[in-house]
Image: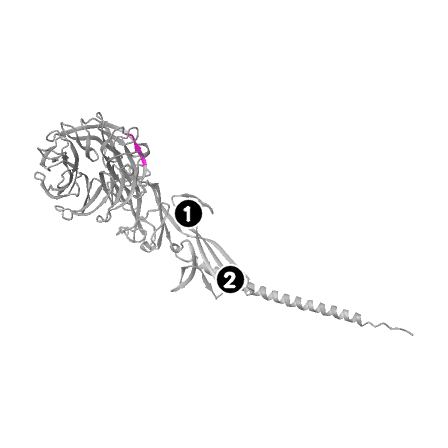
Amino acid sequence: MRNYKQQSGFSLIELLVAISFFSVMIVLIVTVTSFNSKSKNLYEERSQALLYAIEGMEAVKIMNWDNLESGDYSVVISTSTWELQGGSQVLAGQYVRNINIEDVYRENSSNGHTYGPITDTGGYLDLDTKKVSVTIDWQSRTSSDQQEILENYIYRFGAERTSQTDWVGGPGQSNWSDETKFFSTDSGMDYSIPGIVTLNAGFIDWNNSTTTATFDTLGNFDDNHVYETDGVAYLVTENNPSGPELYIIDVSDIYNPYQLGSLNIGDAVTSIVVQDDYAYISTWDNGGEVKVVDVSNTSSPFISGTYDLPTNDNALDIAVSSNQIYTIQGSKLYSFSINNPGDPSYLDEISVDDNATDIYLSGNYVYVATQDASKELQIIEVTNPANLSPIGQYDLAGSLKGTDIFVRGTRAFISTQNNGSGAEFFIFDIADPSNPSLLGSYEVNETVHSFSIVGPYALVGTNFLAQELIVLDVSVPSGINLVSGFDLNGYVLGMSANCSVIYAATSSNDGEFFILFTNVFDCDYSDVGILESSTFDTGSDEVVYNWIAWEGTEPSDTSIRLQLATSNNISGPWVFRGPDGTSNTYYTDSSSEFINYTSHEDQRYFRYKLYLDSFSGWHVPILEEITISYTVYP
């Protein structure tokens, strides 16, 4: 009998294989279909993102260049015009667009003209190039984070520049034809040296000074102080029981001074300041340390006002502003109103901790020299004279006693009593009155009684018998030099000085008042100078002005300022404006500064005005080159 094997198992395996095969195929087909769908979606999303990026980039390219400041922005349409707004924006509920604008720096620069390869570190700012990056972020339909970035450099095409590097041609040129000339200048400017314009610095030869005259006050009493103004010297002395303590002397002829009038004050006078028709004096009079003298008639002065300070200490110095006076007595600084000059009224007082010896008023501050060994220099803010406030101080090395003080611009000078082997004359930087810093010192080797600053020189009254007056060159505080010295037969206890003449109050018993004159090669020390350029023609009234830059030297106590004027008439009018479009501001950034757009748009002709300032008599700013960028558009 024949047996047959069943084969159903084989058929089942085949079925399972077939099912598996078709399952894999189905999954593969579904996967491929899904992948193609996702790819299509992502492609569509990326295309939309790229369109948004291109739109943002093109919007930035057509904007006003002056609006392209560094930062992150979005772009919106306002009255049919693209505008930048701070921050990013959401588009179509899905895409976040951020536009970043960056400054561009290059490896080389010369007076506003920046060139060479772009650098990521250091370098020089290129005012005519910006880097723009448009970033689009979104979450795809597959919930994955996606990003597209479009970067480009944009340029201010058509930018022109004009420069002036010389002014020796002089004034009088209305239109810009000779690049070494200009329209006008005042007497403060010096343009005689090729390649620069600066302030007149002057020159005085103190090595050839002579005593032109002396004046002998009654008795053997020291002259304490002198104040000269408009050819009249007001000289005050220590107490003279049988004569005057105030002398009014005509010094208009420095070789022949003569007395105009005098007044018996009744006690020693330590200091005097004259303003208008009044002389304000500090005295030893316990019944009225502060006095006001009417000097409207110099031949018949009289006391018109008195104020008795709280204690019996002597008032040692006085300072005057337009409406206030300040005086020191013992350890106190006092302020008074002189709205009625004949009747000073008390405002405030403040302690300076130890005996104050001298004061100097400059701006909103009174600088005090004291005998306080821990703060010989003290600075009091007097912005509100009815509320005096301490703001700064300096402790000199050792236990010194201040004798005199003087302020010029951002520098304060202080002298002391004999300091043995140390210095007695000091120079401070007071650009920040709350934090004065020592710049330099000089060892006089004797007590300094008084001093004055004229130009780059300190005229110093000392306790030397053979050189009671010395002249120091203080133009470099770290290297003060002795220039010359004079024997006056008496200590210089007070002085008033101008460019070429020193009026000295001394302790001499024979001719206490000295007048010294020095050879002057140029007495024209200038604190300010103004130069107006010739008219420059851009060639079109379809023009915008981009930026202004200059090269030169600008010491810390000087300034260089510029303004620009434009017109569509070659003859003006010329209204000079600063960066905010008004006449109250100035372009002060030498590296470059954007010119106010709306104030000068579509004005064919321009002029610049240069202002040079020196807040001291020893440093001057120097301009070497000025460049102005503009763009004529189609």
118 part of magenta stretch: no
**C-beta proximity under 8 Å, tags 1 and 2:** no
> How is the structure coloured here?
one colour
Residue 190 visible:
no
The quadrant holding residue 282 is top left
**Disc 1 and disc 2: Cα gap in Å?**
34 Å
Magenta stretch? 439-443
Q: Which residue is mark 2?
A: 138
Q: Nearer the viewer, residue 299 or 157?
A: 299
Residue 108 on image: x %, y %:
43, 43
Dot label at residue 231? none
Q: Majority secondary structure of the magenta segment?
A: strand
Disc 1 marks a residue whose amino acid type is: Leu
The quadrant holding residue 261 is top left
Quarter of the picture holding the C terminus: bottom left
Q: Is residue 621 above or below residue 470?
A: below
Does 518 sit left or right of 438 as displayed?
A: left
Does 437 sit left or right of 279 as displayed?
A: right
Label 2, residues with CA under 10 Å away: few <14, some 14-19, many ≥20: many
Disc 2 marks a residue whose amino acid type is: Trp
Q: Which residue is mark 1?
A: 125
